[in-house]
Amino acid sequence: MANSVFNSWGSEVKPLRYGARDVAAVVAWGEVSVTDPNIDIVGLCAEYAHAVRDNSCGHCIPCRVGTQVIADLLDKIVAGQGSESHLDQIIELADTIGQASFCDIGQTSPKAIAYMIEHFRADFVSAIKTPPQKGSYAYKSFVTAPCMQACPIHLNIPQYIEDIKRGRFQESLDVIKSKLPIPGVVGRVCVRPCETACQRGRADGALQIKHLKRFVADVALARQAEAKPSSCCSCGAAQKSATKDARVAIIGAGPAGVTCANVLAKEGYKVTIFEMLPEPGGMAAVGIPDYRLPREILRGEIGETEKLGVEIQYNKALGKDFTIESLKADGFKAIFVAMGCHTFKKMRVEGEDAGYYGFVPGVTFLRNVNLGRLDELPKGKSIAVVGGGNVAIDCVRTAFRVGFTDANLVYRRTIKEMPADPVEIHDAEAEEVKFHFLVAPKRIVAENGKVVGLECSKMELGEPDASGRRRPVEIPGSEYVIPADVVVSAIGQEVDTACTGAVPGVELDKWGIMVVDENLMTAVPGLFAGGDYVSGPDTLIGACAHGRLVGKKIAKYLAENVIEKLPEEDEFALVKQLQTMIPAKNGPLPAGVARAAIAHEPAAERKVDFREVDKGFTATEAAREADRCLRCYRIVTCACQA
């Protein structure tokens, strides 16, 4: 048996946890780490070989055939039917598979098997002579990839990209919709953490993962439009009746609430969503302009969840039309608070609270536009928007589309520090938005109660602040005025906590938000909270991830009265631990196929209306882009005390 703790990464051996259990050993990324010197190396190797065989895609013949042979030989050794020649055969096969395979399953996984045999050959020889007793370890194997780990909802990205490459568009969509009910929405507005993690980015550009997701969603939509009116929707969803008695209330029809409802409806629960707006989508509906997210896409995908039997009651606000206590009194056995951040942070500048005509918060500006309340917008030709995030960019680009001819964005740092999506910044530049960098608002200038400009100060960057970005420092005497008929504040959003009221047994944090545990449940059994309501303004895909987790946990809670982490949470938590001990590896990668460009509507034409800016992929373009995927799968096998 192994007689010491070690890892083949050459870094410090750290204790690892899989859920509530200590990890005795783990094989991942083609490397091995052992923390329990008594681990059964032979059993661990055999278990890992099975996982490698089971997850081989089969497209590379040496990997498909060779991993089966390796698993069979290790089974013989464990059963006492092997020979020492089998060990050499396995090492030779491992080298062949590694050299001939296209993806990381074949390139890295056999390497770990060969490593264990070469460094612990005595253990294998001993097992051949005397078959080991069944150990006291429980093994767990799963697949991950850099893009999967970075994705908040952990979509199997390499799989759905592989399906696109093979022309299996419906299969690709099925992979996505197994976790994410609104792929067309996310495929348009996601901030792409997966693409940041894409290993192809080190060679010739990360894959266009977001747009590949959008592509299969749009293909399904096109097929649905071509089908007869009576045909089923593209995803196979149909009107369903609840099969279980327990009823669930969800507060908010945004991405978190809808995703949660989708999960629960498929589990057979009757779900009612209470939405304060007159239509579904939450902040996705009223905070994202149609040129980025067409309203029919959002409504259509949420409609598929409604077809599962989910009821959405509109114009129903928490604290006004109902309370948490009234929902419980009405018989709802579980409640999910999934409200978004609909209020704004103040700039704290002179004139902000004076009630001037022409001053409006960014969230209000976008809401009025998206709900068609253009008569409620302050009128003018010149606008100044303060902020550096996506909301600020959305406001300043929307301004052109509602009649402004001069659009200015004021940001107190440089473009390098802007938190907005670089793609959105580029599109705003193309539409001739005027950027004022290293400038901070100081006073809203008004005449006769009407905004006429924004007084600003020039800034310079000092030492880094708590965010890690260099802190802007005012340059004395640098004040100047940007002429503007309208000033929009878009420096941040907050949750409206006043509507929740006091809920017996529920603890509130210093911001007035319900305190939840690691399972997103409050101290009151059956009362959950998630999405932006818990995290603050976050990504749309992050809200979907919360919604899915809560849906899964509510289903288990109602069925078994149990609240616990899902196996996938433990899996990705283990990977996160591993990432802290794996040295960065930036070896050479194949290059030569550039990242596909996305066609856009001409800037001069699109800026005057709300047509969708991005055109998306054609089938040929999508297949070519999908073919760039390196399939960076990693097999992880860990051993824990049973």
Image (cartoon, helix red, strand yellow):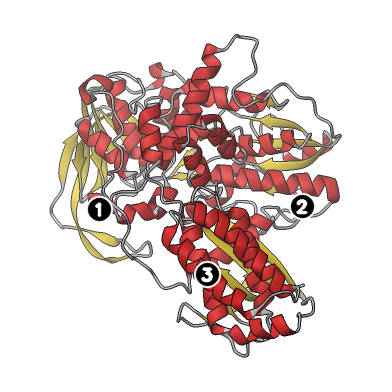
- Label 1, secondary structure: give it: helix
- At 30% from the left and 66% from the top, the residue drawn is 464
Front one among 229 and 111? 111
State the mark number for residue 524: 2
| Residue 207 seen in this snapshot | yes
Is 165 drawn above or below residue 196 in the view shown? Answer: above
**In the drawing, what numbered circle is on residue 310?**
none
Of marks 3 and 1, the one in the foreground: 3
Q: Amino acid at mark 1?
A: Lys
Look at 43% across and 50% down and name the residue there.
193
Marks 2 and 1, the one that precedes in the sequence:
1
Q: Quadrant of the C terminus?
A: bottom right
Q: Nearer the viewer, mark 2 or mark 1?
A: 1
Residue labelled with disc 3 = 578
Q: Nearer the viewer, mark 3 or mark 2?
A: 3
The quadrant of the rendering that contains the N terminus is bottom right
Q: Answer with mark 3 or mark 1, whichever residue precedes in sequence.
A: 1
Left or right side of 364 for 117: right
Q: Residue at x 13, y 51 (%)?
A: 478
| Element carrying mark 3 | helix
Left/right of residue 322 with respect to residue 395 in the rendered view: right
- At label 2, which amino acid type do we have? Val
Labels 3 and 2: the sequence-earlier one? 2
Q: Position of residue 209 (x, y in %)?
A: 42, 42
Q: CA distance from mark 2 to mark 1?
A: 44 Å
In this figure, which residue is indicated by the disc labeled 1? Answer: 416
Q: Taking the image as drawn, is residue 617 in sight?
A: no
